[in-house]
Amino acid sequence: MQLKQVIIIHKAGDALSRRCAAQYAKELESLDCQVLTGPSGAKDNPYPVFLASARGPIDFALVLGGDGTALGAARHLAPDGIPILAVNVGGHLGFLTEPAEVLKDSHQVWERLAEDRFAIQRRMMLQATTFDGNRENQQPLSDRYLALNEMCIKPASADRMITSF
């Protein structure tokens, strides 16, 4: 893998993941890699800016946070085939992320990536599009939505949701 252009996403509002992102950005920049860094969270979506600012292909994304941060990255980066290294730094859940110890010797990680000594685990993505009317209507009402592990479909209004007690 070439390390010419990398994006580093850190969990919004988390000081530890922000500090680690700055450290890893500095390390990668010392290897002549262009790094784009930013927060990702409920109110922060760096992906449109990253994708528009890229001066060429993005080699990989380093995602620092928990499963929510990793899922957001997958949703936005999968359509462009950008590999993700998701590490649980500052996150709560870590089912989809690697433990923080993976980056204990980060220089070795960058070296392994540059020498193609890694494996990519491919994951199935769910895709959804909404349609109006019966099955004969083939005109979608919405864009295509992607999700990594689950998707929730609900009515437009919460008070129309079916509940049980």
Image (tube, grey):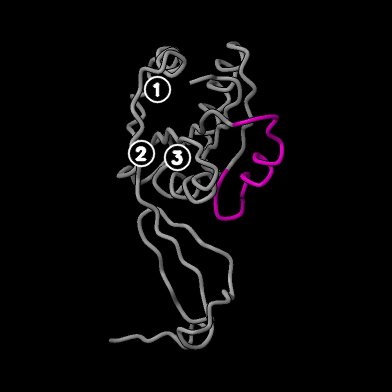
Q: Residue 55: percent from the left, percent from the top?
A: 70, 29
Sequence-first tag of 2 and 3: 3
CB atoms of marks 3 and 1 within 8 Å: no
- Is disc 3 placed on a helix, strand or loop? strand
Which residue lies under the disc numbered 1? 103
Q: Nearer the viewer, residue 158 or 127?
A: 127
Above or below, 109 against 62 in this view is above
Structural distance between the alpha carbons of marks 1 and 2: 12 Å
Which residue lies under the disc numbered 2? 97
The amino acid sitting under disc 3 is Gly
Q: Residue 113: percent from the left, percent from the top?
A: 43, 19
Q: Residue 23: percent from the left, percent from the top?
A: 54, 21
The amino acid sitting under disc 1 is Leu
Which residue lies under the disc numbered 3? 65
Q: Residue at x 51, y 30 (%)?
A: 60
The amino acid sitting under disc 2 is Thr
Above or below, 124 against 162 in this view is above
Sequence-first tag of 1 and 2: 2
CB atoms of marks 2 and 3 within 8 Å: yes
> Can residue 41 be found in the magenta stretch?
yes
